[in-house]
Image: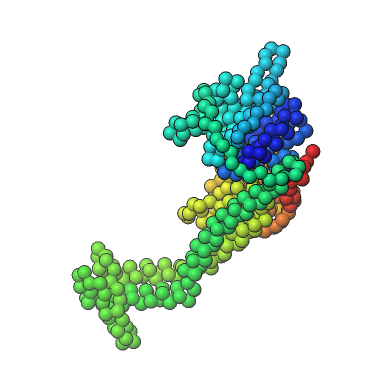
Amino acid sequence: MKSFILKKVAEEIKKRRKILRALRIDENLILLQLDRDRFYIDLTRGESGVYININYPLVRRFSAPFDRLLERLFTKAQIVGVEQWERFLVIKGVQQSSFKRVEEWLRFEFTGRYTNAIILNPDGVVLEALRHITPEQSKRVVLPGVKLEEPPPREIREQEFPIGGLEEWTQQEFQRRYQRKLEQLKRQGLRRLEKKEREILRKLEGLGSEQEWQERGERYRKWGELLLANLHQIGPHQREVEVVDWDGTPVKIPIPELPNLNRVGEYYFKLARKAFRKRENLHIQRSHLQQQLEFLKNYRRIIEESDQIGTLRRYLPSRRGGERDSQIEKLEIDGFQVWIGKSEEGNKRLLKEAKGEDLWFHIRNHPGPHLILKTQKRTIPMEVIKEVAKLAVQFAGKEEGVVDYTRRKFVKVKEGAKVEYGKYSSVKVKPTPPINSSPKR
C-alpha cells in the first residue's frame, strides 16, 4: 500500500460521518460502509490496499473474537477522527446512547508481513486484532490487553504517480490484483488435478488386457499342475525348478517360500483363480477409472470457468491421497463438509456412509454424481444448499439444471447407486454472472 494513496484514502474517509457497517467478508478483506460508499480494506500480506465501491460478495460469515468486536463497536458508529501517517490509518468511532458514550479506534497497518487490523481503546490498549503477534514473533507485541507500542518512524521512499480519480483508480487496481490472484489459484488447482489425472492414467495402463490376464491365469494353472506332478524334484530352499511340460517342452517354474512345499501347487492354483477373476472384473475397474477421469474433466472445467476467488478457494482439490480420496472428493463450504462421488463406486460408498440426517443432492433427469452435505445435526443456511446444488450441476457437466435434495434417510437404494427418494425439495441452478468492478449503489 503506497503511503500517498493511503493519504488520499484518509482524506476521503474524513468526508464521511458514519460507519453504517463494519465486518470481515473474506479471509483478509474488511468492508466499511461509510455513509453511501463502501470501502474495502485488503489486508493481504504484501498486497494490501483499499478499494472503493467494488462489487465483492460476502464469502462467509466470520465469528472470531475480532469479528464480533469489529461489528459490535463500529457498526453504526459516528466517525469522530481520522489519522494517517506513513502506512498507518486510524479511524476513531463513537457509539453513543442516552446512558454512555463509547469511543474506540480501528487501526489499519499496511506494513508488509505485519499488515494488520487492530481495535484499540483511546489509551492505546489492544482490545482485539485480526492477527495476534506474540513476543516470539516480534518485539512489538499485538495481543488483547497489551498496550500497543508505536514502531520507530520510517522515512517513506516511494515515487508518486498520477492516479486521476481515487475511486476509479482503486477499482482498476482491484480488478488487476483480483485477476492475478484468480489466475494463480486456477493454476494451483489445475496442477493438482493434472497430478490426479496422471495417477489414474497410470492405473489404467497398469490394468493390462483381458487376454493378458487370461494367459497369466492359464500359465499359473499349468504351473500348479506340473508342480503337483513333480513334487519329488523340489528340494529344500530351492528357488526354481525345471520340469517337462506335457508336450515335452522344458519349463522353469519359480518356487515361492512356503512353510510346506507340498502346497506349492495350491499356491499357483490360487494365483490362477485371482488372474481369472481379474480378467472378469477388468471392465468394472476400467469403468471406475474412466468415470474418475470424467469427474476430473468436469472438475477442470469448474476451475477454469471460476471467476470468483471465494468460491474457487472452496473448489480447490485436496492434496490428500489414499483409497478414500480415489473415490470421494471432499470440499468444505462455510464449515460444512461436502462429499462428492467420483464414480459409481464412490456414489455407493457415499450412500452407505452418510448419516440419516445428512442431505443428499442429485441433478434431476441427468446422470451425475451423488453429493452428501454433512449436517452434524446443524441448521443448514440456504446459501450453502444453493452452493452444493450448483456443484451437483457442474460436476454433471451442465451449466444449469434442477437439483433435488433430501435427507439421506428418505433415499432408498435400489441397485448399485440407483435410488428412489421422497420428501425432497429442489433448487434451480443458473449460470452465475461474473464479478466486475462497477459500483453498486
> Can residue 82 be seen in this snapshot?
yes
Quarter of the figure with residue 400:
bottom right
| The furthest residue to the bottom | 248
The residue sitting at 73% across, 41% down in the picture is 166
Placement of 189 over or under 115, stated as above or below: below
For this rendering, which residue is in front, 234 or 238? 238
The residue sitting at 56% across, 49% down in the picture is 330
The residue sitting at 65% across, 20% down in the picture is 103
Asked whether, in this view, residue 125 is left or right of residue 164, the answer is: left
Q: Position of residue 264 (x, y in %)?
A: 29, 69
For the N terminus, the quadrant is top right
For this rendering, which residue is in front, 173 or 152? 152
| The furthest residue to the left | 236
How many numbered circles are shown?
0
Q: Position of residue 285 (x, y in %)?
A: 52, 64
| The furthest residue to the right | 441
Q: Position of residue 433 (x, y in %)?
A: 74, 50
The residue sitting at 55% across, 22% down in the picture is 125
Colour mapping used in the image = rainbow
For this rendering, which residue is in front, 99 or 347? 99
Q: Position of residue 17 (x, y in %)?
A: 75, 26
Quarter of the figure with residue 248:
bottom left
For the C terminus, the quadrant is top right
> Can residue 346 be seen in this snapshot?
no
